[in-house]
Image (cartoon, coloured by chain):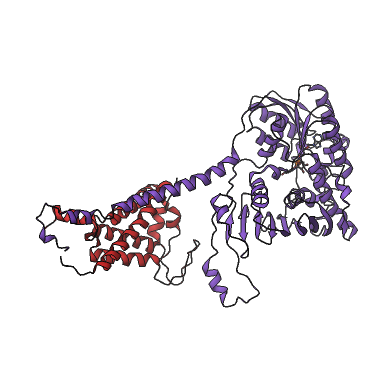
Amino acid sequence: MNDKFTFVQKVVLVLLRVVIGWHFLYEGVAKLLKANWSAAGYLAQSRGFLAPLFQWMADSPGVLAVVNQLNIWGLIAIGLALILGCFTRLSAVFGMLLILLYYLANPPFVGYYYSIPMEGNYLIINKNIVELVALLFIAVSNSGWYAGLDRIIKNLWGKK
Amino acid sequence: MDTPKKEERGKLGRRDFLQGVATVPVIGLFGYALAKERQYVKAQKEIKLGTTEVTEEGEELNVALLGAGAQGSVLLNAMLQIPGLRFRAVCDIWADYNLKRAVNLLSKYKFEVNGYEDYREMLDKEKELDAVVIATPDFWHSRHAVDCLNAGLNVYCEKEMSNTLEGAAEMVKGARQTGKLLQIGHQRRSHPRYIHCYEKIIKEAGLLGRIVTVNGQWNRSVQEDLGWPARYAIDTDTLKKYGYDSMQQFSNWRWYKGLGGGPIVDLGSHQIDIYNWFLQARPRAVIASGGTDYFSPEAHEWYDTVMAIYEYETPEGVARAYYQTQTTNGSLGYFENFMGDQGTLVISESEAGGTAGSIYRQPNAPDWDEWVRKGYVTAPKIQMMKKELDISNRLDVRESVSPDEHQIPIEFYDPYHKPHLQNFFNAIRGREALNCPAEIGYETAVSVLKVNEAIAAQRRLTFDPAEFEI
Ligand SMILES: NC(=O)c1ccc[n+]([C@@H]2O[C@H](COP(=O)([O-])OP(=O)(O)OC[C@H]3O[C@@H](n4cnc5c(N)ncnc54)[C@H](O)[C@@H]3O)[C@@H](O)[C@H]2O)c1
């Protein structure tokens, strides 16, 4: 692997990975600590072509319980992995998937109305998409190689 | 320098290792931040919980209920949640119905209670009573309260203290002469959210600055007159004996002159009492408009619609306070709104609706960070950007953007009347002072009854400071 980045660029790349990880981790931990947190409200609010799917999740208690746990622990795991730079590519991809789901549940498309107020003004692109693309960059640039456990893992067990 | 090729597979250089663990300390940082945040949340929660602490049981008090109608039942149910009370007797002239219901309820809770139709018989026979809770119609309060005080009982009497000032004055004197306690049922005086707002937000933190205007309302949707099950109708002689012409009047006493005071007295007295309390003042004048505009005047002698404006001389200067009550549209329910030069407080006893407790900072006021940290108010909910954007192109220099909204962080899950009753029983045990003693009830009665006078007089009426004193 050759070095495409200058030192400063690497530092920024790691920083980007760590702050996104922090955000994921806290989103997960906060939900974990909030007694009775559930995605039901968010899912029930869903708009767009996938709305029936999300509303079905909200309406079936069994599915909802699984979705809640997957969401909480997924966020925590991805957050930790991104901060530590461990399986960075994989966790970035999972992170993108999660964000994509959030986005599709409530896409800021023209003409949708939400009763949950949004803290900004968006047209198609919202902060979810920004974070998603940032994760994409982390995945393609392999940020975990610079200041991350991936370096140790690769060195010990990786293919030459 | 970063090429792994230098190293053998399965081996790890020092530099690679250090680079590998470079971000591990971030987890520690995260843990530290999280712990700090938890501490803060916990502190905020403790402030909330501190208000609903359970008072420990004291010596058992023997209690009677006088008047077991709608409000009598509400009070009874609240009292059943208070430890240390032993119910001995219930009195109500509706022997076949309300009296029976209350006695049955109490026997379900394993209390042996005697039922009485005539309160004098109850006072003659029940010699062990410590306290009586009175929830009869307003025009009976004075006689009931004074006779109970004279019989040596401590009295919790529902508002309105009395439908006449003479009656209310007798009650104040009765309490003074007997040395017994008389608590008037303005239950907001004991409500943790109201106490928090007065003691902490207005008095200690001064977040409203100088309160210059107040407004409040109790709006109700159209309601039918109250009915009664025909087979339990009280006979005319009994009704006459207790001051009622008919079952219609007996059930809807609030609307009749000489029995009640109409919505301004029934509902308004609760909130005008808060005006006096939060402003720490008594009104000096009132103008009012009102009438029976919607319902039939025969069955609604008192005004179904009232709008009143008080003038107060507060320690900081003049304040004007508007109040309205109407019975044809329940929009926005009931609340009180205090507007100072630094902040606005909207508060309501009602847990329903969005007005239970919000406070808005004026842009010119010093910031409230300290009070957010102390948990006096919540962190602000920033007004939606969108709203501002939508109006920004129309906003001219005379308009101000709506201020950020903070909440009053007092959650309250008990029955509304429980803390006020608790305060009464704790006062009997010598642990607390009454939150609404006779003198305060009297001040409120003077303030409120004047509105009906002002409507009839069709002019501004002033209060003589001596009117508030007994
Ligand atoms: N604090 C509050 O929030 C609140 C709320 C509602 C009512 N109240 C007050 O409670 C009191 C009762 O109101 P309510 O809505 O229960 O009225 P209500 O008509 O439902 O009940 C009155 C009861 O008193 C009985 N009664 C009447 N005259 C009597 C007498 N001479 N001796 C014994 N019993 C007698 C009646 O039979 C009836 O059961 C009023 O003063 C009212 O203002 C206070």
Instruction: From the viewer's perspective, tell me whether residue B292 is left or right of residue B193.
Output: right
Q: Residue B425 falls in which quadrant of the image?
A: top right
Could you tell me which residue is drawn at 16 percent across and 67 percent down? A2
Residue B30 located left or right of residue B107: left
Residue A47 vs residue B448, the one in the foreground: B448
Work out which quarter of the rendered image holds the C terminus of chain B and state it. Answer: top right
The answer to whether residue B101 of the structure is visible from this angle is: no
In the image as oriented, which residue stretches furthest toward the front? B14
When asked about the image quadrant of residue A18, the answer is bottom left
| Residue B243 place in picture, x, y as percent | 87, 39
Give left or right: position of B340 versus B287.
Answer: left
| Quadrant in which ligand 1 is drawn | top right
The front one of B393 and B233 is: B393
Across and down, in percent, residue B249 comes to 83, 44
Q: Name the residue rendered at 57%, 74% in the picture.
A: B391
Quarter of image, res B326: bottom right
Does residue B400 appear to the left or right of B182 in the view shown? Answer: left
Q: Colour of chain B?
A: purple
Count of marks placed on residues:
0
Tell me residue B144's x, y (percent). Answer: 83, 34
Residue B264 appears at what percent x and percent y? 79, 52
The quarter of the image holding the N terminus of chain B is bottom left
The answer to whether residue B397 is visible is yes
The red-coloured chain is labelled: A
